[in-house]
Image: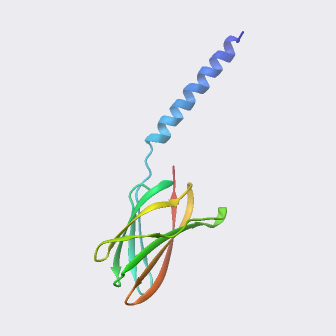
Amino acid sequence: MIKRWQAVAAATLVTAAVALFVVVRSTAAEPVNLTITGTRYAATVLIADPAPGQVTVEIKVSKGDADTVALSAVMAEMGHSTPEISATKREPGRFVAVGELFPMSGVWELSIRLDGPAGEEQLAVKTLITR
């Protein structure tokens, strides 16, 4: 037979777990908007929903005439890296990439590889992915 205090403790734990689940699920991460400038190119990266798993990343190239753009990410502290994802050119200077860049929350270094008439350049910027 369960003692009364054990039943109250169990009910309290279940209530706390449900409340925590609701709060975490309703807390949306702020969009990531990063601008980075290199020697040949400058780009702004927008991640509307920066969370682990599948993400959509928009890249706007504001300096240089990039023909191709690809993204990858590294979490050096944990020894994680992701394969490169090619972005699709939507219009001149605007690319969109869809894929799994961030398998877990934490600080990631996002690498943007741009290639065009000016040559190839790799830009890197750190970002925090939460949730």
Furthest-left residue in this view: 91
Q: Name the residue rendered at 47%, 41% in the picture.
A: 25
Residue 105 position, x and y percent, is 56, 54
Q: Nearer the viewer, residue 84 or 58?
A: 84
User: Compared to 77, does 114 lie above or below?
Assistant: below
User: Compared to 70, does 18 lie above or below?
Assistant: above
Q: Name the residue rendered at 47%, 35% in the picture.
A: 22
Residue 12 position, x and y percent, is 59, 23
Dividing the picture into quadrants, the one containing residue 120 is bottom left
Q: Name the residue rendered at 31%, 76% in the picture.
A: 93
Dividing the picture into quadrants, the one containing residue 39 is bottom left
Q: Nearer the viewer, residue 24 or 81?
A: 81
Dividing the picture into quadrants, the one containing residue 5 is top right
Q: Nearer the viewer, residue 37 or 96?
A: 96
Furthest-bottom residue in this view: 118
Side of 102 relative to 58 (left or right): right
Side of 13 relative to 58 (left or right): right
Side of 116 relative to 51 (left or right): left
Is residue 23 visible in the rendered image? The answer is yes
Residue 92 position, x and y percent, is 28, 77
Furthest-top residue in this view: 1
User: Compared to 15, does 6 lie above or below?
Assistant: above
Side of 90 relative to 8 (left or right): left
What colouring style does the render use? rainbow
Q: Name the residue rendered at 53%, 59% in the picture.
A: 102
**How many marks overall?**
0
Is residue 39 visible in the rendered image? The answer is no
Q: Quadrant of the N terminus?
A: top right
Residue 126 position, x and y percent, is 52, 68
User: Compared to 17, does 108 lie above or below?
Assistant: below
